[in-house]
């Protein structure tokens, strides 16, 4: 069964990280977060990609 990986907006991603949208975009610019998927004029991210960034940061913190 193929599950759909939801696409999230910058505001939703910022909530996941507990930061502002401005900080979210700074992290995209510095490469901490992946670049967005562009659909028309929209910028979206795979939720799983954002969760993977969080998981990597947690693994580095506990290593």
Image (tube, rainbow, N blue to C red):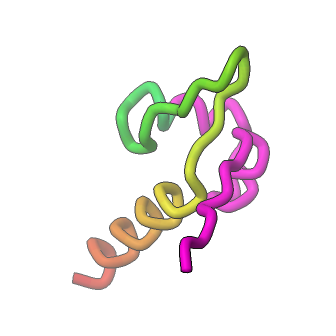
- Front residue of 40/2: it is 2
Q: Residue at x 65, y 28 (%)?
A: 43
Q: Measuring from the top left, give residue 40's x and y in whole percent.
A: 69, 17
Q: Quadrant of the N terminus?
A: bottom right
Does residue 56 lie above or below 19 as drawn? below
- Front residue of 57/39: it is 39
Q: Is residue 43 left or right of residue 53?
A: right
Q: Quadrant of residue 22?
A: top right
> Magenta stretch containing residue 9, yes or no?
yes
Q: Measuring from the top left, give residue 44's x and y in whole percent.
A: 64, 37
Q: Is residue 47 left or right of residue 53?
A: right
Q: Quadrant of the C terminus?
A: bottom left
Q: Quadrant of residue 31?
A: top left
Residue closest to the far top: 41
- Front residue of 46/25: it is 46
Does residue 33 lie above or below 22 as drawn? below
Q: Measuring from the top left, give residue 61's x and y in whole percent.
A: 32, 75
Q: Residue at x 69, y 58 (%)?
A: 18
**Magenta extent:** 1-26
Q: Residue at x 70, y 39 (%)?
A: 10
């Amino acid at each position: 069964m193929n599950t759909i990986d939801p696409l999230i907006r910058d505001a939703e991603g910022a909530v996941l990280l507990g930061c502002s949208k401005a900080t979210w975009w700074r992290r995209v610019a510095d490469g901490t977060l992946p670049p967005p998927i562009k659909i028309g004029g929209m910028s979206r991210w795979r939720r799983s990609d954002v969760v993977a960034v969080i998981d990597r940061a947690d693994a580095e913190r506990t290593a």
